Image: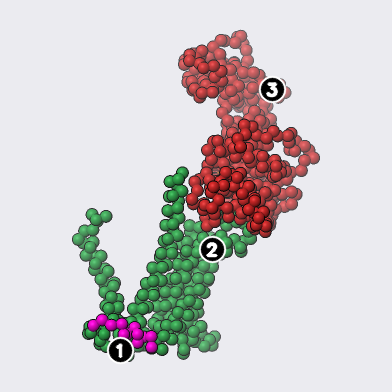
Chain colours: A red, B green
Amino acid sequence: MNKAVGPIKRKFAPWDDPAGVPFIRFENVTKRFGDFVAVDNLTLDIYEREFFSLLGPSGCGKTTLMRMLAGFENPTEGRILLDGKDLAGIPPYKRPVNMMFQSYALFPHMTVEANIAFGLKQDGMESDQINTRVAEMLRLVKLEKFAKRKPHQLSGGQRQRVALARSVAKRPKVLLLDEPLGALDKKLREETQFELMDLQIELGMTFLIVTHDQEEAMTVSDRIAVMNHGVIAQIGTPAEIYELPATRYVADFIGDINLIEGKVSAVSGTQLSLTSEGIGGVIDAEAAEGGDATVGLDACFAIRPEKVRISREAPPAGSHNVLEGEVWDIGYLGDISVYRVKLANGTIVKATVANMTRIVERPITWEDKVYLTWPRDAGIILTK
Amino acid sequence: MNKNLTWFNVTALVLGFAFLYIPILILVIYSFNESKLVTVWGGFSTKWYASLANNQSILDAAWVTIRVGLLSASLATVLGTMAALTLDRFKKFHGRALFSGMVYAPLVMPEVITGLSLLLLFVAIGFDRGFWTVTIAHTTLTMCFVAVVVQSRLVTFDRSLEEAALDLGCPPFKTFFIITLPLILPGVVAGWMLAFTLSLDDLVIASFSTGPGATTLPIKIYSMVRLGVTPEINAVSSILIGVIALGVVAASIVTNRAEKERERAERAAFAQG
Ligand SMILES: Nc1ncnc2c1ncn2[C@@H]1O[C@H](COP(=O)(O)OP(=O)(O)OP(=O)(O)O)[C@@H](O)[C@H]1O
Ligand SMILES: [Mg+2]
């Protein structure tokens, strides 16, 4: 079962619907461990059937957030609602939420089969139904041949898949996956991603997933929340997060981006102009949402390397949105080449160029003087 | 390995072992002595073992000892495991330090004092001394050993396994019996065996807490010795040594084997990739 593309998603955007009711709601949730604030006054809505990803650096509170939803930690302040009901006081074994643990937490004294069947047994499911479900799960994670093994007889990736199967087996309303695919190789990971998406659509579950793999988050999620130090830096669809980052932190965290520091020199509506010493010229672009727009403010222009055009021909004098520099380094990555261009003030700007032909000789080479240009709406000015 | 076996090391080893085991060896050898005189070798014989089988008072004492051992070891295992769990789980309750100190105090308390205090207690509440008082006294003595053994096992126990079980809908009580207990079982079994052996060879506490009709084997041996050492005593003692050695060896095998097996299986899995 090798699918080139995932299931085509119908238009799904309950978060844009003013009448939409969130399925999971974190309401001003704070979690402290002693003096340390792991989650800081966080409010987050997740909708039914949504595939929601949490992205963020290690230690930013992703696991803590999940553990509160699963019932292993109590919020210090605030409340968590599931389907309109406050979860406070409901023990983990009575919540319609299943979690896949970052450490897998497989029962070492039980076979793979028994591990997967564990949750179903607790529900008092008939044994032949359990067998069918377990077989189905083993097929999903491609571990049919390992059903009778104990966890310690499996490789890391295999254990991870057992943990995944075990948490999915009960088909909970909400599935929490803490780095579910980290230990898998690229091919298996992509296959499993699509299987998960299929499963989610088929069963109508709500997924909350933690991942360090941005590409994975982009592929699978309806929305992504980027976290930093216990707060949410930005929530949005993958495209919004990538194309319209709200802050430098988000811009820098997701994908590759050029950040050019400067000062706001003109404001007209949501359009800003940015000047900076040593880069020559003026950069005009849209302001990021939620940012301040005052002349003289420190700001930075953010543009993705693939949107920067590189050329040896000088554009007409006085044009805006032009940077001038010298080719500092060229990286050949097969499908694309990355040009690192050094501006007069020393800033390095990356531009990627798709390798459309089998170039033997490059039209642009080391130490060439080049001009970087881009369409007017390709970048964004960040003031936060 | 061989390089480390210097002349000094070998001597130290031989002396150490000789010091520990020669008295026991002599005792065992003389239990096979034909002669009635303990100090004169009169040829090999197993007749003292045969005469033991006809000595009803020794058999009775052995039976009491075994019953007390089984019962007190089991009680101590339940109580000791519970104490170990509490100490492991609740890191921060008020009085934790006091509680853990109190659990471990009997480990270092002079047995005479433990015995005496139990005796005073039984007298004070008017408990007739006999089988039950010895059993209770042994439970008190051995439960702290069980707690220590079980606690060392709990250190390596991964709490997220319990969380996973809860998460999958298993209530806490059931989780304990189907997840936690099976995984700490080697520690619990080792604790039981240790408790059983301790109960078998205890003389001091038993003599304080015993009463008519509940003479344990060590008490019996002790009182026989006071009337003179006979080869029969050597024979009983040899058997007791055998049983205790078996218990200790079994306890260490149980704890070691589980670890080794896991390591081996892990290596095998690793080799397969
Ligand atoms: N029980 C605890 N006691 C004290 N501090 C804790 C506890 N659990 C988590 N923390 C702290 O809270 C912070 C957030 O932890 P969390 O496990 O949520 O991070 P994470 O975002 O999941 O990181 P990773 O990506 O590495 O898994 C960390 O700094 C961690 O040290
Ligand atoms: Mg984590």
- The structure residue drawn at horizontal position 65% and vertical position 34%, both measured from the top left corner, is A6
Q: Is residue A177 left or right of residue B263?
A: right
Chain containing mark 1: B
The label on residue A271 is 3
Say what secondary structure mark 2 lies in.
helix
Q: Which residue is mark 1?
A: B228
Say what secondary structure mark 3 lies in.
strand
Q: Give the x, y percent position of residue A284.
A: 65, 19
Q: Is residue A277 above or below residue B34?
A: above
Q: Quadrant of the C terminus of chain A?
A: top right
Task: Give the farthest residue toward the left.
Answer: B7
**Over which residues does the magenta segment extend?**
B43-54
Q: Is residue B201 above or below residue A141?
A: below
Say what secondary structure mark 1 lies in.
loop
Task: Give the farthest residue toward the right.
Answer: A19
Chain containing mark 3: A
